[in-house]
Image (spheres, rainbow, N blue to C red):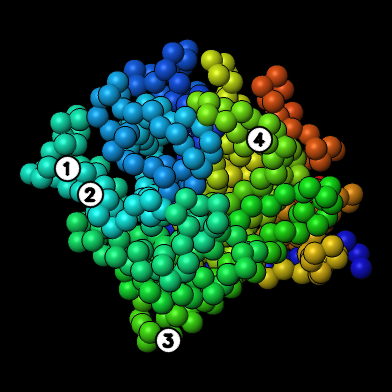
Amino acid sequence: MSLKAKMIIEKDFTIGEVDKRVFGSFVEHLGRAVYGGIYEPGHPSADEQGFRGDVLELVKGIDVPIVRYPGGNFVSGYNWEDGVGPAELRPKRLELAWRTIEPNLFGLNEFVDWCRKANTAPMMAINLGTRGPNEARQLVEYANHPSGTQLSDLRISHGYKQPHQIKTWCLGNEMDGPWQIGAKTAAEYGRIAAESAKVMKWVDPSIELVACGSSNLTMATFPEWERTVLDLCYNEVDYISLHQYYGNRDKDTSNFLAQSMGMDSFINTVISTCDYVQATKRSKKRMNLSFDEWNVWYHSNEADSRIEPWSVAPPQLEDVYNHEDALLVGSMLISMLKRADRVKMACLAQLVNVIAPIMTANGGGAWKQTIYYPYMHASVFGRGTVLVPLIQSPKYDAKDYTDVPYLDAVAVHNAEAGEVTVFAVNRHLSEALPLEIDLRSFGTFRILEHIVMESDDLKAANTLDSPNRVSPHSQGSAIVEGSTVQAALGKASWNVIRIKL
């Protein structure tokens, strides 16, 4: 088969509206995500609260709409009260999830302040490992109740007269995982999630709640976990979570780049399970998905095994991302956009230093990792309505996947801006892929730009000393021919084709 791909998009054939929260991220008290990441008093760029200005600017560049906090595995042993009030009175704690010392210099109120400066919204996780419904409703009262109670007045005494109005809450983290503090069976978790959700919404009926789904698609209890959990808390929650990470430990890039097909299957299986529970309950309520941990994660595993325990903010999970990682991140974004009708929130895990698009040197500079770029492009240009992508593409077989299309693509129509943006990955490692995009239903149009991210070295990465080794350019080949766009997608490339209607 000759290497040529075609994509047809019709403006009336839609999947769903993009919820901007699908471009969210995640900051956990883990490694240097907080201390030395978003918060470093004394840094040359730090403001009066100790927030790094250089990091804030890079975060704003992605236009991150929501950030999950404070964990992650960390939250299952965390007492939120340790992180509020005068910093000098806060306790230092053994942090069992990651075997470090937590100084609690940064907590809920600082995080909300940081979110405001970063133009983002907080997504708070509650501890359902060592705690339960009582502590959950107390945290909502402290954060969101206006005044006149012990906890809301305590917040006011801490300098926050106005309630934080945190609208999105996660009911624990990865509670199916034996690595989790206070891990539970599906029945145990479903009951405590339902009871926590109930009292949290009694305190503040305006909040939205995310129940824990499976920690990854290879869990032995998947998808029975989702079925049992939702059977017990369907009426009380608004979303169920998905978590998934990928790696290329076998140095098999063709198979690595196909792994987003596993993500497609994961999403579809969870949707099917949600719809099954809805049917059994005769419910009119549709359960949506929050893919609140996703990324490539494997580079740092060996280095992490050598870190001495019980230090403060050691360099944990500091994956150095290369070009092929950025390609898979692009495909993972495409996977979520293709189910924009049901995937309404997602969090790239994580935001700074810890398996992150942004890296910092303590006391020094900050730079963009390769994965920063597809994440930024999707967030900035991917707002609007996702169109059904009718794709014809040559395919290949990989170790774990068959019939893998060389072209992975999706299109988003922003009617307000009068634009269509096509996001596309060419998975072919040695040849360019000619692409025809049929836009006959859109009338006349022109190319705004064709952004390309490519490299002859799949393992090329950005560092403090070479921060722009892998970065996008706008010299792509896309042109208009009649009612089509013709483009050549370079080998192993990420492409953003912006079309003005």
- Give the CA distance from mark 4 to mark 2: 35 Å
- Taking the spot 83% from the left edge, 55% from the top edge, the residue there is 254
- What amino acid type should be assigned to the residue bearing mark 3? Thr
Q: Secondary structure at mark 4?
A: helix
Dot placed on the residue nearer the N-terminal end, 4 or 2? 2
Task: Give the image location of residue 376, x and y in percent.
Answer: 57, 42
- Quadrant holding the N terminus: bottom right
> Seen in the image, is 429 located left or right of residue 144?
right
Which of labels 3 and 4 is toward the front?
4
In this rendering, would 463 be left or right of 144?
right
Q: Are marks 4 and 2 in contact (CB under 8 Å)?
A: no
Q: Residue 500 in the image: state x and y as whole percent.
A: 57, 51
Q: Residue at x 36, y 63 (%)?
A: 193
- Three-letter amino acid code of the residue under disc 4: Asp
Using the image as rendered, state which of residue 393 and residue 165 is in the foreground. Answer: 165
Q: Residues within 10 Å of mark 3 (few under 14, many from 20)?
A: few
Q: Earlier in the sequence, mark 2 or mark 1?
A: 2
Give the residue at mark 3: 280
Q: Amino acid at mark 1?
A: Leu
* Residue holding disc 1: 151
Amino acid found under the numbered disc labelled 2: Gln
Determine whether the residue tagged by mark 3 lies in a helix, strand or loop: helix
Please state which of the two labelled residues, at mark 1 or mark 3, is closer to the viewer.
1
Whole-angstrom CA distance, mark 1 to mark 3, is 40 Å
Quarter of the figure with the C terminus = bottom right
Q: Which residue is mark 4?
A: 304
Q: Within 10 angstroms of label 1, few (less than 14), some, or many (20 or more) residues?
A: some
Q: CA distance from mark 3 to mark 2?
A: 33 Å
